[in-house]
Structure formats: C-alpha cells, structure tokens
Image: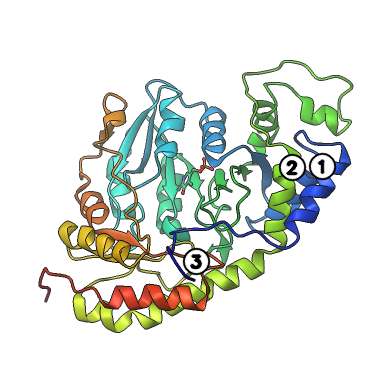
Amino acid sequence: MDGLIPFNRPHVPAAAQALVAECLASGHHSGDGPFTRAATQKLRGHVGGGGVLLTTSCTHALEMAALLLDVGPGDEVIMPSFAFVSAANAFVLRGATVVFVDCRPDTFNLDERLLEDAITPRTKAVVLIHYGGVACAMDVIGDIAARHGIAIVEDNAHGLGATSDGRPLGSFGALATQSFHETKNVQCGEGGALVVNDPALLERAEILREKGTNRTQFARGEVDKYRWLDVGSSYLPGDLLAALLCAQLDAFDDIQARRGAIWSTYDTELSAWRRDHGVPAQHVPADVAHPSHLYSLLLPDRADRDRFIRHMADAGITSPFHYVPLHDAPGARGRSRVAPSGCAVTNDVSARLARLPLFPDLGATGVERVLEAVVGFVPRRPHD
Ligand SMILES: *Cc1c(COP(=O)(O)O)cnc(C)c1O
C-alpha cells in the first residue's frame, strides 16, 4: 500500500454492488424488507441464536436496552470508564446515574474483581464492553450479576464472531448490542443490532423499535391492525443498508481470515521489539477467541505514546490512541460517579495505548510498512 496508510478503510465485498442494485430494483427500500430478514438470519448464527433486531446504530440499540430494562432516575448502571460514550449516554438519557468502574491493566476490560464493591441496592444493570472483541471474565461477572439480580448488557460492538469458553459473545447478556459502523469488522456505514437473549423482552423490543406500535406483528400477519401501545421511536434501518450488510455477512469468513492474518503477523513479528522495549500488547486470555478487531499496544508512558503516534505519522501511518476516560469527561458531571476503587488504571491505559492499522485490504506491503515503522521506534522511558 503506497501513500498514507489509514487506520481503517471500509472493505467492499464483490457482491455488494449486485445486492444493493437488487434492493434498488425491488421496490422495497424501507425497513424490515427481504434484506433485513436475510441479514437478521445470518446474524443470529454469530450471536448464539437469540432474537436479533437490526437497528440504525449500536447507539440506538443501547438506547433500546435502557428502555427495555426500565432504567430511570434513582437507578444506577455500572460500566467501565474505558468505553465508548454511547454506553453511558443511553442510560443517562433515561435519567439513570452511571457508576464507573476501573478496567484491568492487561485486557482493558472492566475489572471483574472490582464489580461487586460497586453494586448498591440501586444497581439495575452492568454494561460490558469486550475491548477489541476480547471477552470480559464472563464466568465471574455472570455469577455476581445473578447473585445480585442485575441485568447484563453486552456492548459487543467489537466482538462479532468472538467466543468465551466456546460460547459466542452477544449471547451472555439479557441484551447485547452490535455495531455496523464503518470502523467495525462487519459494516454498512452506519448500522447496528439489538440481540435479545431474554425472551420476555422480545415482544416489547419489537414495539419500541417500531414507534411504540405492534407494526412488526402486523407485518407478520399476527394481528389485523397495528396501533400505539407503548413508548418507542424509529430504530429500523432501510433495506438498502441491510443489503450492504448481507454482502458483508456473506463475506464474513474472508473478512475474518484477512484480519486474523494481519493480527497474527503483527503479534509474531513485533514480539521481540515488544519484549526489548517493555511494550505489552492487549492480553488475550487462554479461553477466549477474538475477532482481530484491534491490535493495541501499551507504550511505557504518555510521552512515549504521543511520540509513537507522531513517529508513525511521519512514516505516513495512522496509529491512533483510543478511549478518553468517561469518568472525568465534561459530560459525566452530574450524571455519574466513580466507584470507590477509582479509575487509576483507566487513566493509565488511556494515556499509554495506541492502535495499529488493521483492515482487510491493508495488504502485505501495508503490513510490512507498519512493522518497519513500529520497530524503528525506541521508547525513552527505561523499563526493567
Ligand atoms: C462503535 C462503537 C459504538 C457505537 O456504535 P454506533 O453503531 O456508531 O452507534 C458503541 N460501543 C462501542 C464499544 C463501539 O466500538
């Protein structure tokens, strides 16, 4: 790859043009058409077979999760501070208070050892982000949530196709959310899905998604008219986007193989450099399979990380930082609090993390250029 290497470039499978053309010609462009049904079926296979509802974004799926769990003022929702803003905003929009818990220094996921101490009688749910699609400690978290009667919501935007102990991510929570934003492994520009694993929530989820009506049941011929039943909004994407998503899901194995090859090459070829300079990559526990969504490195300190990003930019390579902590962001004020254990690891990880370009069409020469640039960087801060 010549010229600038971006962090991400959306992959367009060969079949995409034909499927979008087919949708254009079909006369069905609004939501819940044939391509939405096809994409939904394909998705179910990747997330464990629960109910799947396509949405306009992962953000909207998270908003639906907050509505479905009836979270409101006085309720608390626990989540990591090292996370995407939508996880917090979805619950803040309902008037709930977010309680931020620190992340682990190795996987960058919510630290399960700190979870139980953050629970109060007001805790209604815990939102998990499987960072880079590397699963959170689901056995420990599942036990704690069950013991306290707290719902689990998986923000699985990174983790489509990943497993923990052989079980798909997106199948652990009462609810899980997926993203098909351009930057994700499977993408249609903007899009998402809500995975409903608690069957008791499925009917209401369909109603919330269709403007508070039972139009979805009507479309299936289950009722003879549809009417206003509940609160709701319009969360369904048009069928053109679903056609694009179908092309992506049909190419899933190819996309994953290409990403996996790049991830493994980075990991193998950088192991000596990482050891020599004390730069760990994200830790992948033995019982998890991840979807090669991100390759992230922890530089020795913020100054080295910032120098690393500039060094990569000088080589024409975009190697960005990632989440700025949520807990002390301006938007967090008056809407959240930090769990008693604090968020020191989140601050540290956020200051030291950088990600390498990783997308299906990076190509062998692109990978070579990235590797060459990385090993040409020498951190200043000494390590032991
Ligand atoms: C991308 C992302 C989102 C938001 O997804 P949209 O589909 O853009 O709303 C939410 N959470 C995580 C962890 C993400 O990576």
Q: Nearer the viewer, residue 363 or 125?
A: 363
Q: Which mark is residue 290?
A: 3
Residue 342 appears left or right of 324: left
Residue 199 quadrant? top right
Q: Name the residue under label 1.
A: 24
Q: Nearer the viewer, residue 239 or 230?
A: 239
Q: Is mark 2 on a helix, strand or loop?
A: helix
Residue 236 appears left or right of 137: right
Foreground disc of the pair 3, 2 = 2
Amino acid residing under circle 3: His
> Do callouts 1 and 2 mark residues in contact (Cβ within 8 Å)?
yes
Residue 37 appears left or right of 97: right
Residue 261: x and y in percent read: 52, 76
Q: Is residue 295 above or below residue 203?
A: below
Q: What element carries label 3?
A: loop
Foreground disc of the pair 1, 2 = 1
Per the model, the C-alpha gap separating discs 1 and 3 is 35 Å
Q: Is residue 165 above or below residue 341?
A: below
Q: Can residue 139 be seen in this view?
A: no
Q: What element carries label 1?
A: helix
Q: Name the residue under label 2.
A: 240
Amino acid residing under circle 2: Leu
